[in-house]
Image (cartoon, grey):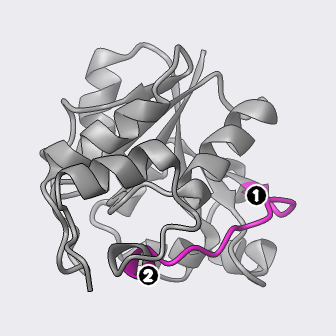
């Protein structure tokens, strides 16, 4: 079985995230997707508690969408992958956006990460093939036909919930997660 590993802050989960998951499954790139919210993100501020982000993601859990609340205590992607591989005996595919390719070589223990396949979803006008020139091509699956949905999590946190599922909106309001601006 092919497992996709989709790691992010999901602060909060929005329709753009769900579109990624559906694309992976509907195009048979993977059989299941593990969605793993990180407890902290090195370049992001104002991240709410990971438990609340997990709870919001749980609205989308199915037999093929696994919301992971066990392996999210690691600061580095290679550590997450190592931990997941201990619990799953499946072929693992890391899922990233093409915007990550520019600095992927800077990721901690990138050689270890590249032991796995990486699915790259196109963001904006990125030329995935050009961005992949410095990496071993056999490790990557380029999804040039993915139509990125540009959703601003910052705008959502500020109250614009146009691209957010109603259950998530209600959870945010009920728990006063981001406050009204």
Residue 113 placed where, x, y %? 41, 51
Q: Is residue 78 visible?
A: no
Residue 52 placed where, x, y %? 20, 47
Q: Is residue 99 shown left or right of residue 142?
A: left
Tag nearer the camera, 2 or 1 = 2
Residue 98 placed where, x, y %? 63, 71
Q: Is residue 151 visible?
A: yes
Residue 27, above or below 39: above
Residue 145 is a magenta residue: yes
Q: Is residue 42 shown left or right of residue 115?
A: left
Residue picked out by circle 2:
155
Residue 94, above or below 12: above
Q: Which residues are magenta?
A: 142-155
- Which badge, 2 or 1, comes first in the chain's sequence? 1
Numbered badge on residue 142? 1
Residue at figure coordinates x 22%, y 32% from the top left = 69
Numbered badge on residue 167? none
Residue 159, above or below 53: below
Residue 150 placed where, x, y %? 64, 75
């Amino acid at each position: 079985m092919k497992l996709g590993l989709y790691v992010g802050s999901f602060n909060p989960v929005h329709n753009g995230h769900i579109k990624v998951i559906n694309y992976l499954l509907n195009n048979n790139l993977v059989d299941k997707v593990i969605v793993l919210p990180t407890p902290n993100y090195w370049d992001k501020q104002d991240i709410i508690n990971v438990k609340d982000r997990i709870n919001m993601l749980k609205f989308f859990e199915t037999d093929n969408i696994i919301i992971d609340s066990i392996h999210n205590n690691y600061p580095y992607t290679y550590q997450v992958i190592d931990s997941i591989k201990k619990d799953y005996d499946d072929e693992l595919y890391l899922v990233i956006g093409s915007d990550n390719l520019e600095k992927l070589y800077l990721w901690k223990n990138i050689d270890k990460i590249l032991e796995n396949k990486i699915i790259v979803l196109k963001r904006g006008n990125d030329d995935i093939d050009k961005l992949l020139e410095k990496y071993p091509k056999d490790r990557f699956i380029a999804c040039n036909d993915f139509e990125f949905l540009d959703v601003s999590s910052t705008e959502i946190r500020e109250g614009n919930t146009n691209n957010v599922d109603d259950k998530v909106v209600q959870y945010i309001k009920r728990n006063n997660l981001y406050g009204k601006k």
